Amino acid sequence: SNVMLLSLSNDITLAGQGIFMMGFEPLTPVKKVTEYALDHGIRHYAALIPDNDYGAMVESIYTSTLSQKRIKPYVVRYA
């Protein structure tokens, strides 16, 4: 069957052949906000992140962006 699907999701891994995403993609905004804070002299970071695939994606870009400046954030995961 040739069925197209429009998903309202933030899981960009679902996009593919015949599946189109329309939703909040977290990676770019998380990186931009973190870079903005770094550019304005903020040096201490903490994050409250959901303990799921979305949270893992956000934590990865967040910690990666901070590690470029040798900053390790305090991260708390919640269920």
Image (cartoon, rainbow, N blue to C red):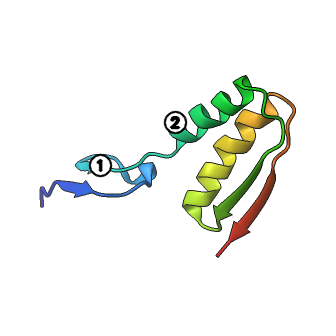
Q: Residues within 10 Å of mark 1 (few under 14, many from 20)?
A: few
| Left or right of residue 47: residue 18 | left
Residue 9: image quadrant is bottom left
Q: Give the residue displayed 71% in from the left and 66% down from the top.
A: 77
Q: Give the residue displayed 14% in from the left and 58% down from the top.
A: 3
Tell which of 15 and 40 is nearer to you: 40
For disc 2, the marked residue is 28
Image coordinates for residue 42, horizontal then vertical, percent: 78, 34
Image coordinates for residue 19, horizontal then vertical, percent: 26, 51
Instruction: Find numbered disc 1 in the image and state the secondary structure of the residue it sits on.
Output: loop
Tell which of 41 and 10 is nearer to you: 41
For disc 1, the marked residue is 22
For the C terminus, which image quadrant?
bottom right
Residue 56: image quadrant is bottom right
Q: Amino acid at mark 1?
A: Met
Instruction: Decide which of tag 1 and tag 2 comes sooner along the chain.
Output: 1
Tell which of 14 and 9 is nearer to you: 9
Q: Amino acid at mark 2?
A: Thr
Question: Residue reaching furthest top?
Answer: 39
Question: Residue reaching furthest left?
Answer: 2
| Left or right of residue 5: residue 74 | right
Q: Which mark is residue 55?
A: none
Q: Residues within 10 Å of mark 2 (few under 14, many from 20)?
A: few
Q: Give the residue displayed 72% in from the left and 25% down from the top.
A: 40
Image coordinates for residue 12, horizontal then vertical, percent: 43, 49
Q: Give the residue displayed 65% in from the left and 41% down from the top.
A: 61
For the N terminus, which image quadrant?
bottom left
Q: Is residue 65 above or below residue 40?
A: below
Instruction: Find numbered disc 2 in the image and state the secondary structure of the residue it sits on.
Output: helix
Q: Alpha carbon of mark 1 to alpha carbon of mark 2: how far?
A: 15 Å
